[in-house]
Every structure is written in C-alpha cells, then in structure tokens.
Image: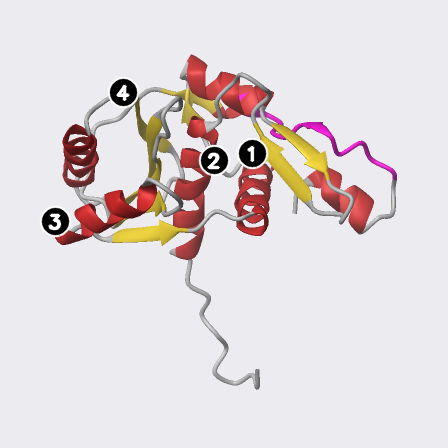
C-alpha cells in the first residue's frame, strides 16, 4: 500500500492525496536499455494508442524487476503496429505480453494471439486502473523497481496525477494536454510481474 494511503486509511491522519502520484522516480530512473540475455525471463506491458496518443511497450526483467526496453511510437499503419509488437515479443522471448483490451486494443490482441503469442488481456476500469497504479506507486516508494532514464518516461511519471472522488475512490491521469501512455504501459508490465509471483501454501495449515 502506498505511504500516503496507509497514513490516511490505516493511521487516520489527514493527508492531501491529490496531485503527484509517484515518489523516488529519479532514484529509480538510472538504467539504460539492455539486450536480452539467455536464461532471463521478461514480460511486457502494452498501451495501444488512440488517434492522438502513443503506443508504448515496456519490457521488464522478471527476476531483477528492472526495465530493460521501451518502445514508443504513433501514427503507424495497423499492420506495422502488429509487426512491431511481435518483433519485441520474439526479441526478448517474452513469457507474456499484457495488452490493454479496451477499444482499439481488442483487435490487436486477437491478431497477436493468431500469431501464437502469449497475450494477457487487461481490461481497464476505474477500479483496475486504481489497483495497478497503486501497486506501481508502492514499487517506486519501496525501491522494488528500476526503470530506464528516458526523459519522456520520467516526465510522465513525475506529472501523473491523482484525484479523490466523492465515493472515496481515486482517479488517475496525466494533466490536461499531456500523455500517460508510458505510465500505463509500465503499470501493465509491473502487474504482469506481480501475477507471476506464486504463493506457496503451507500444507499443514487449514485455509
């Protein structure tokens, strides 16, 4: 659980929960892109572009939890987009690629699946977005993740905002006129790593 939310929800302190979301970004943004290494496992998160946004692919090393690659592009034909995603998949020998299934993402997923790729659809709702953003937020705060020193990525992370709704839930987005494609792609990839962590149950305990 992110520190701010813990302080308010658990400790009962008043905390301003609006504004910037991610802490310790500069501490984490120290890496340069890495070529795939034999014996390593990688997952990727993909935020597929709408008409004015960017398609972003973020690749993470499952064991080290380090970002090793990012691709960001827009205004490409549909076949080029598919080929580009497939190229990243095979280049890093991905164990899975998490792709947002909303809107334009659905046909992208369908085509990638027909090509034999292990694609994990992610349906973005206000609840699921809150969950993956808060998980990524905790990862930065606790020093669990390191990312590329890419100005666009760092800029999006630092400017990403939260607002508390009347219901008590949170909404997350980039400021007006800015993008959050890199943030969402990274959040999908981080969620993919978390899903790969298996909980081994104690056989002597009654659940």
Q: Residue at x 19, y 52 (%)?
A: 113
Quadrant of the snapshot with the C terminus: bottom right
Tell me the number on the disc at residue 50: none
**Mark 2 residue element:** loop
- Magenta stretch secondary structure, dominant: loop
Most extreme residue toward the top is 151
Q: Is residue 102 magenta?
A: no
Which segment is the magenta one? 14-25
Asked whether the residues under the numbered discs 2 and 1 touch, taking CB atoms below 8 Å apart as contact, a structural biologist would say yes
Structural distance between the alpha carbons of marks 2 and 3: 31 Å
Asked whether the residues under the numbered discs 3 and 4 touch, taking CB atoms below 8 Å apart as contact, a structural biologist would say no
Most extreme residue toward the left is 115
Query: Circle 2 is placed at which residue position?
Result: 145
Structural distance between the alpha carbons of marks 1 and 4: 31 Å
Asked whether the residues under the numbered discs 2 and 3 touch, taking CB atoms below 8 Å apart as contact, a structural biologist would say no
- Where in the figure is residue 97, as x and y percent of width and height? 29, 46
Q: Which badge, 1 or 4, is on the more N-terminal residue?
A: 4
């Amino acid at each position: 659980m992110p520190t701010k939310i813990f302080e308010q929800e658990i400790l009962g302190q008043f905390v301003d929960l609006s504004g910037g979301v991610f802490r310790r970004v500069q501490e984490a943004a120290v890496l340069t892109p890495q070529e795939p290494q034999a014996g390593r496992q990688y997952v990727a998160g993909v935020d597929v572009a709408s008409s004015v946004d960017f398609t972003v692919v973020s690749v993470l090393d499952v064991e080290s939890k380090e970002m090793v690659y990012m691709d960001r592009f827009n205004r490409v034909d549909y076949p080029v987009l598919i080929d580009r995603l497939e190229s990243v998949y095979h280049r890093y020998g991905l164990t899975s690629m998490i792709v947002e299934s909303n809107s334009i993402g659905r046909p992208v997923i369908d085509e990638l699946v027909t090509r034999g790729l292990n694609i994990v659809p992610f349906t973005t709702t206000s609840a699921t977005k809150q969950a993956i953003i808060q998980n990524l937020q905790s990862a930065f705060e606790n020093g669990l993740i390191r990312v590329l020193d890419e100005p666009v990525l760092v800029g999006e992370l630092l400017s990403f905002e939260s607002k508390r709704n009347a219901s008590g839930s949170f909404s997350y987005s980039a400021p007006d006129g800015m993008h959050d494609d890199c943030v969402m792609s990274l959040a999908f990839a981080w969620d993919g790593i978390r899903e790969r962590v298996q909980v081994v149950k104690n056989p002597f305990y009654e659940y």
